[in-house]
Amino acid sequence: MLLPPPPPPSLYDPCKSQSFFSQCFINLGLLGRGSFGEVYKVLSLQDGQHYAIKRSVQRFRGDRDRQRSVREARNHERLCPHPHILGFKAAWEERGHLYIQTELCCTSLLIHTEAQPHNPAESVAWAYLSDLLSALQHLHSRGFVHLDLKPANVFLTRSGRLKLGDFGLLLELTGDRRGQPGGKEREDREEGQEGDPRYMAPELLRGEYTPAADVFSLGVSILELACNMEVPKGGDGWQQLRQGSLPSEFVNGLSGDLQSVLRMMLSPDPSKRATVPQLLALPVVRRQRWRRQVSLLLTESLLFLFSLCQTVLSTARGLLASVRLPFLTARAPSVPCTPPRDSWEKDGDCSTPPFSFSYNDTESLVEDVVFFPEEMGPDYSPTLPHRSKSPIFVSGTSTPHPKTQNQQPTATQTHSPVLNWIRPEPCLRPTFEPKNLLGLFDETALEGQS
Ligand SMILES: Nc1ncnc2c1ncn2[C@@H]1O[C@H](COP(=O)(O)OP(=O)(O)OP(=O)(O)O)[C@@H](O)[C@H]1O
Ligand SMILES: [Mg+2]
Ligand SMILES: [Mg+2]
């Protein structure tokens, strides 16, 4: 693989009033919203790549709130890269907001399946199950539990590969706590940080946080996707699903194999529920995973060849143009392929759309919205966004969060120069002192105790 070109010497100037976000990224529009924040598609001016940046909408309400938000970034950073885990790039805290920069995907599994006109074929459900079992295997074998697994927190790449994301409720089960009801962890959960009730395992209500809870949530998600059914939020339907009774009017259409795997995953007793390694060892699951891997390999190879051809073609076109141009146009002006440096470096230009953002307690960057057709894939970049008078509505897929309020932006300007880094950025000026997130987390933990 080619190494990325070295980053430009310095994009971020801490002396300027614009945030790191507006100095170093072009905001290409809103991708989605959750209870924690808003997610934007961005173009990094440092490496020319597209990313997703999740930004907490509300400023931290005290140390504990900040600690919880920082924990999401810290946990995501600690997860080693895996083909079915959303890639982490960086995270930083600035002016009371947390930013998490991740790999860009096309859409969430929820949005993707809702856009399909027909029930998915059973092979699609097996493919989803294979990918997400691999993701859970990665988390569980490292002592983590996700606790918020649902289609809205699963993302799709251009090849259709699933990536598990949103690590806001991720919990590390340490030492003898693995598989046991947590001590400190339980206190934190009691503050109202709970997953979506539709996918929640019954034992979570008793404070039992184990890997089995993720298996249950995955079972409900696959049931929802395979049967195109609306899973209940509460009431009798919710209870029945947690007593081991699957809705026959829906599951009767599934093969015996898929039905029995779902029953193993949805067992009401977490100690009798199949574990991820047990599920992966089932012959039917092994067969389906093998098929899935072959199909992903083929699709990704084809996509790779396609983009290689595109690169070769555009290079050839560029070469042709450079050979012909001197004869055709005597003094043709050079066309910049990236926004001209001074358009985002000049203070005045940074404060005009689409680069301007105001800073107050709950402000959103949602006005800089561009809608991305899903079929365009993550590489699709429209022309630079124009400020839309009526922002496009992007439906929320939030995990319920009791403390979240729909506050309107206030006019208060609260400029604070604080920018804390999770990991050092090579292109920052020497005057800038990056902080490692682990250090930041320890700091907040100490603050919380004092
Ligand atoms: N990397 C990404 N690529 C494409 N879309 C994304 C990406 N990350 C998030 N989104 C979109 O943004 C939405 C919200 O993201 P996410 O679930 O991470 O936010 P959240 O605030 O933590 O949500 P929750 O309320 O579930 O905790 C997703 O459902 C998805 O539509
Ligand atoms: Mg989410
Ligand atoms: Mg979340």
Image (spheres, rainbow, N blue to C red):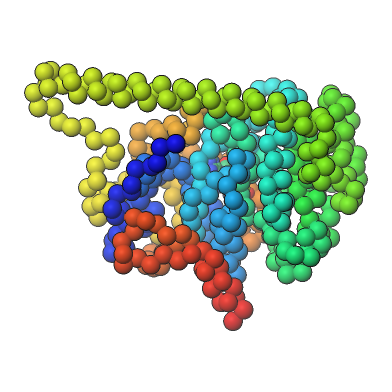
Determine the residue located farthest toward the bottom in the rendered image: 450
The percent coordinates of residue 439 (x first, y second) are 52, 69
Residue for point 50% across, 25% down: 303
Residue for point 42% across, 43% down: 42
Residue for point 65% across, 25% down: 294
Viewer can see residue 160: yes
Residue 419, quarter of the rendered image: bottom left
Residue for point 28% across, 21% down: 317
The percent coordinates of residue 267 (x first, y second) are 88, 44
Q: Is residue 89 above or below residue 284?
A: below
The percent coordinates of residue 338 (x first, y second) are 29, 38
Answer with left or right where residue 129 lies relative to residue 68.
right
Viewer can see residue 414: no
Q: Quadrant of the C terminus?
A: bottom right
Q: Quadrant of the N terminus?
A: top left
Answer with left or right where residue 146 lies relative to residue 4.
right
